[in-house]
Image (spheres, coloured by chain):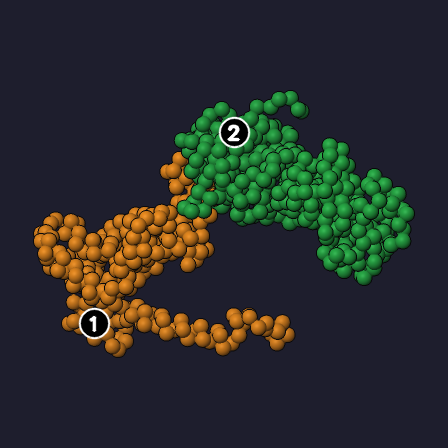
Amino acid sequence: MTETKQPIIQIRNVSKRFGKVTAVDNVSLDILAGEFFVLLGPSGCGKTTLLRMIAGFEMPTEGQIIIDGQDMSLVPPNKRPVNMVFQSYAVFPHMNVMDNVGYGLRISGVSKGEIRDRVAEALELVKLGGFEDRMPDQMSGGQRQRVALARSLVMRPKVLLLDEPLSALDAKLRAQMQFELSDLQDKVGITFVTVTHDQDEALSMASRVAVINKGEVAQLAPPADLYEYPANRFVADFVGSVNIFEGKLTLDEPDKAAVDCPGLGKIYLNHGVTGPHGADVWVALRPEKIYLHVPGEGKAIRAAAQDAPDGHNLARGTIKGMSYLGDITLYEIQLEGGQMIRVSRPNLSRHDQEDFTWDDKVSMHWRADSPVVLLS
Amino acid sequence: MFNRTPIAPLEYTRKLWMRSWVGLTMLFLYAPLIVLMIFSFNDSKRNVVWKGFTLKYYEKALNNDSLVEALVNSLTIAALATIVSLVIGALAAVVLWRFRFPLKGLVEGTMSLPIIVPEICLGVAFLIFFAKVDWPTDLPWPLNLSAITIAHITFCFPFVAMVVRARLASFNKEEEEAAKDLGATEWQAFRDVLLPHIKPALVAGALLAFTLSLDDFVITFFTSGPDTITFPVKVYSMVRFSVTPEVNAASTILILLTVILTFIALKLQGVKGIAETH
């Protein structure tokens, strides 16, 4: 799996401006052959513009897009070795499934018999075998999306582009399609490039994710790195849920570091940060990495947190809000300094959610490798 | 009959007052036409009192060469005007929908002027225009109809453009992009995706243009020469002497023609398709 892969798409210093608005700002990245690449970002961040430039529907204002070694600057969309699944699916409403899926083959002059075979094969792939004669208005949204998928896959593109593929599906179907898309990608071996604003989608499907913010790549990393080692506050906040506290770096050595956060207390990390001493930094702490205790279990806490010096990685507060989500319970806790912190706690047994309730005083601790120090 | 389910608030079709109101409206709209049709079979010159059934006025109308000629002229003009309006109107609609260009608003405004300007003004304008440019009037048929046809195209194509534009507003541009993405050229994408989408609007626009042209009186009156009489103008001149059942018979034939054409168009497209454009 990890042999050296060739980049199939090379994006070189690409910018796109619409009048005074810069949608994509000097982006450079390589997408490797066979990879499931996700462009993740909030709406209006330029991720769709980037995808449309790869497809050829927008021309870069500056920079170059190279697909499979060939500069695409002057190549129109109908000549590019990529196919796109549109957000609205864009299934042709006046054609049945057969004609929809076979459209690309038909205009490229493939023989009728071969079209029939390849359409049947593509429909089988997306689990729509036997739907050839259906009209789009007789199908559900999920089925129409599969038609759009088959219509692109049947062209055997080098790269398949997907624009917000799951945004219009209901939650159950979305979860199922996430698995199916990953499966499909494994099966056909085509490079997938997906645009999404949904972090779950990105984390569950991608081999690598580029988080886009205001037209720039905020971080490019595999899903787990993105979540556990966010590069900046934007990524930490956008991917998953997080508590962020401002602080000053007081200790920074190769194997340990400490941050003094006025809101949260003294933070100790069991690794170095390599930031300027005394610098203003931010500490990001995920809600699920914080342990909740009844106050007075001080010894237990100290024992559990003994990987940090006394008085570090501890906090106290009062529960101000909670929401029971079934598998976990979310707590909003007001710290002694007045700031709020979110903690999530798995309901490992049936009555775990009854352990704490509103206005309970609680203690918290976290491990020395849990906090992430962010310099920007 | 009295044990039916109670009438729900929005079930207007089951309410007596609604039904009678619809009936009255229908009567108001169609009674004159029905009377006209009935009296085309009236065996009387005066056409006021029913004197008995006859078909002789149909015979008379169909043997009236100048009336038949007028009808043929009208149909020819309507057909030509419809075809040209359809092409110009559809292209104008697509251009205005697709592109941004300077003075677009002005182009859009002037294009719909023929809809707004009173017909009488257009008629006078055409009269002066064709006189000024010295438009030849002694051409052989059907070229002698060119002045009227041009005038008709002028006020028909904005209607086509309007209907097509309304339909285009509901077009999902991603469909066109999808076609291109799958390898279609600009023309193939237009033919395979955009054209099928606007087809109902083209049918509706054609129907509109055809009927507008067929029954136009004012503008035609000003642009027709002595040898280029159209049906409405001819009927008008006949009525000036007396309303004989012959006029009724001719009108009945025209009504039937229009109804048949509409019916064919609806069949071709399906009522749903045409309703969607509005």
Looking at the rendered structure, which numbered label has been put on residue A355?
none
SS under mark 1: loop
Q: Is residue A311 above or below residue A34?
A: below
Quarter the C terminus of chain B occupies: bottom left
Res A188 → quadrant: top right
Q: Is residue A116 above or below residue A342?
A: above
Alpha carbon distance from label 1 to label 2: 82 Å
Q: Are marks 1 and 2 in contact (CB under 8 Å)?
A: no
Asked whether residue A105 is in view, the answer is no
Judge left or right: residue A238 versus residue A155.
Answer: right
Q: Which chain is orange?
A: B
What chain letter is assigned to the residue under label 1? B
Spot occupied by residue B83 in the image (x, y as percentages of width and height) = 28, 49
Q: Residue at x 53, y 29 (%)?
A: A9
Labels 1 and 2 share a subunit: no
Q: Residue at x 61, y 35 (%)?
A: A220
Quarter the N terminus of chain B occupies: bottom right
Q: Nearer the viewer, residue A88 or A333?
A: A333
Residue occupied by mark 1: B243
Residue occupied by mark 2: A10
Res A227 → quadrant: top right
Q: Which chain is green?
A: A
The residue furthest top is: A3
Which amino acid type is marked by label 2?
A: Gln
Q: Residue at x 42, y 56 (%)?
A: B277
Q: Nearer the viewer, residue A164 or B227?
A: A164
Spot occupied by residue B195 in the image (x, y as percentages of width and height) = 39, 45
Judge left or right: residue A246 versus residue A191.
Answer: right
Which amino acid type is marked by label 1?
A: Val
Q: Residue at x 79, y 58 (%)?
A: A318
Q: Nearer the viewer, residue A159 or A306?
A: A306
